[in-house]
Image (cartoon, rainbow, N blue to C red):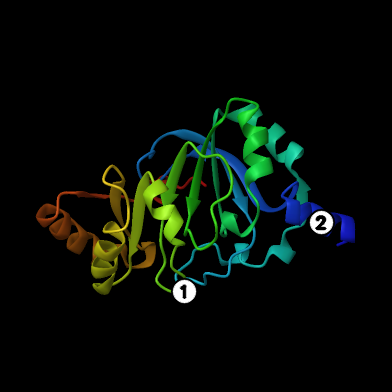
Amino acid sequence: MTEVEQKAVEDGTLLPIMEDFYTIQGEGHHTGLASYFIRIGGCDVGCHWCDVKESWDPDLHPPKPIDEIVSKATANSSTVVITGGEPLTWNMQPLTERLKSYNARIHIETSGAYELTGIWDWICLSPKKNKLPKEAIYPLADELKVIIFNKHDFKFAEEQRQKVGQDCLLYLQPEWSVRDKMMPMIVDYIMKEPAWRISLQTHKYLRIP
């Protein structure tokens, strides 16, 4: 990468894109909504159960100009979901400003491990134990989505719940590889703690991206 390209990446006008595609949102509050996904490469949060580990190394995903990314996204959908990897590894301001110039509704799915940049219509915060969110993002989260891999994750979920705003929607989502074991526990837990809702990875059941 040249110095000019490196500077553009740092500024957020070039971004390492792993993949981008038009599909149906499969998780959380907007399940079932047709959306254009932009999956940005680069993540050092290191969840052992991550199902997109190929996104971790940004060097595997050559940076693309944001105008090219935005053109494809807005030609397909008015709702754009920025995910990763961990998108907040990078400066999201230029990308989101450009999307907003097309009147896109912009969602982010983030661990919150880095400072929040960008303009967002919906913030889905999915905190991870091994690299906790920055404190500043908690009151801004529209949706808290905690992945349940084992029993201790319920305790972690409640700890995270205490930090978000009163109007933040609360979701527990079974980690896919242990879904058959964890779903009954989640159902029982939510029936006792009805402030929570269940999120399922419906796109995997539908066999779509």
Query: Image quarter for residue 58?
Result: bottom right
Q: Which quadrant of the structure image shows residue 188? A: bottom left
Q: Which residue is drawn at 61% across and 62% down?
A: 55
Question: Can residue 65 be seen?
Answer: yes
Which circle's residue, 1 or 2, is located before the other in the chain? 2
Q: Name the residue under label 2.
A: 7
The secondary structure type at the circle numbered 2 is helix
Lateral position of residue 72 relative to residue 85, left or right = right
What whole-number distance in Å separates the C-alpha atoms at marks 1 and 2?
Answer: 31 Å
Q: Which residue is drawn at 55% across and 57% down?
A: 115
- For this rendering, which residue is in front, 19 or 28? 28
Q: Nearer the viewer, residue 52 or 70?
A: 70
Give coordinates of residue 150: x percent, y percent.
28, 72
- Which disc is residue 48 wearing? 1
Q: In which quarter of the image is the N terminus?
A: bottom right
Residue lying at the far front of the rendered structure: 136
Expressed as whole percent of the image width and height from the top left, the position of residue 86 reads 56, 59
Q: What residue type is labelled 1?
A: His
Mark 1 element type: loop
Residue 176: x percent and y percent?
37, 62
* Mark 2 neighbour density, 10 Å: few (under 14) some (14–19) many (20 or more): few
Q: Examine the rendered structure and indicate whether residue 76 appears above or below residue 64.
A: above
Left or right of residue 63: residue 19: left
As shown in the figure, which amino acid type bears the numbered disc 2? Lys
Query: Eyeballing the image, is 30 above or below 184?
Result: above
| Image mark for residue 180 | none
Q: Residue at x 39, y 36 (%)?
A: 32
* Residue 124 position within the rendered picture, expressed as x and y whole percent measured from the top left: 42, 48
